[in-house]
Image: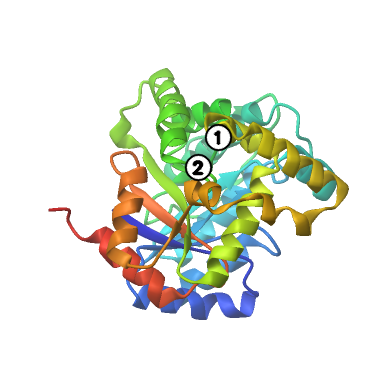
Amino acid sequence: MRVDLTLRALPLADVAGAAARAEALGFDGVAVTESTGSPFLAAGQVAGATSRTRVATSVALALPRTPMDVAYTAWDLQALSGGRFALGLGSQVRAHVERRYGAAWERPAARMREHVLALRAIFDCWEHGTPLDFTGEFWTHTLMPPNFRPAPQPHGRPPVLLAAVRERMLEVAGEVADGLLGHGLQTAEGLRAITLPALERGLERADRPRGSFEITAGMFVATSEAEWAAARRRVAFYASTPGYRQVLDLHDLGALHERLHALSRSGGWDAMPALVDDDVLALFAVRVRDPVVAAAEIRTRVGGVADRVALIGEEPDLEAWAAVAAALRRPVA
């Protein structure tokens, strides 16, 4: 199983050093998020500081950007990284897309589907010289003069990975993307009862084999008390969001969601983590006391489903996380 490290909200000046350290410690990929800055600038820093690991956005927001804008940036990052770039895209939620980015939100799954199909058409134009003729419901791309056309990519087009939580977006991922970036607020039961069946419906719709599709499972990991407290805050935040309620309902935690959601709407952010007890937190996060035991727990949760695991946390102890990653990569007896 391949193991990636997700770098969250680091100052841009610190990204290259963290990425180089992660590669030296043996991580298979380094992903950057869109939280306090541009994920594409951060991905460029990762690409320049590494030579082996996969470089990914996890995720860049698609809906506030046009497919052409994303395509040019992804093409350059694929070249800069020597073919190691993976374009991870996500939709975000209505409030952020409309009120933070000032972009359109209606029918997000349909928009994401079209965004990926438009990217395919643009990449095909650049890679094979196919005339650009994409006309969709939300975006139209029909002009590509020679002096605006990048040279064919010697490494091939970058894979497009979609972040998805709800079933409709999961189906879109299975239908049009090269892989899924799974969210950290996930459980073993949710992965098998919700995520995998929806992906399989999308794959079937496109007549694609499961082997053509990569699944990355997000995993909150804590190797210290500080990281465990940070994971509690993160779970409380995500569990307050309606988009993730289906996972909570699967574990009869709908009432917890309602209490957290009410606090989030009234500004009670500081009170939210206390509502997430250790039993609930353990559903979503792995507490590392022994790397081998932690790796076995992660395998129990995602083994047989995920091709990669992305370790997620805040200010992680990279050496401790690398020990978990090494244990995960060892063959199971």
Could you say which is closer to the camera, residue 301 or residue 254? 254
Q: Position of residue 30 (x, y in %)?
A: 45, 64
Residue visible at 39% across and 42% down?
215
* Residue receiving disc 1: 247
Quadrant hosting residue 68: top right
Residue 107 in sight in this render? yes
Relative placement, left or right, of 77 versus 262 is left
Specify the quadrant of the image occupied by residue 288: bottom left
Q: Is residue 203 above or below residue 291?
A: above
Which class describes the residues within 10 Å of circle 2: few (<14), some (14-19), or many (20+)? Answer: many
Q: List the residue tagged with mark 2.
A: 186
Residue at horizontal 61%, vertical 42%?
Answer: 144
Element at badge 1?
helix
Residue farthest to the left?
A: 333
Q: Nearer the viewer, residue 111 or 315?
A: 315
Horizontal and vertical percent for residue 64?
A: 73, 45
In-image side of 240 versus 95 (left or right) = left
Element type at marker 2? Answer: loop
Q: Looking at the image, is mark 2 or mark 1 earlier in the sequence?
A: 2
Amino acid on which the number 1 mark rests in the picture: Val
Q: Residue furthest right?
A: 266
Q: Are marks 2 and 1 in contact (CB under 8 Å)?
A: yes
In the figure, residue 25 lies in which quadrant?
bottom left
Q: Give the image location of residue 317, x and y in percent.
A: 47, 75
Compared with 28, 296 (above or below) is above
Residue 292 placement, left or right of 133: left
Mark 1 surroundings within 10 Å by alpha-carbon count, few (fewer than 14), some (14 through 19), many (20 or more): many
Q: Which of these two is toward me, 53 or 5?
A: 5
As measured in the structure, the alpha-carbon distance from the residue carrying label 2 to the one carrying label 1 is 7 Å
Q: Residue at x 45, y 69 (%)?
A: 223
| Residue 128, position as x, y percentages in the image | 42, 41
At x 84%, y 44%, the residue is 265
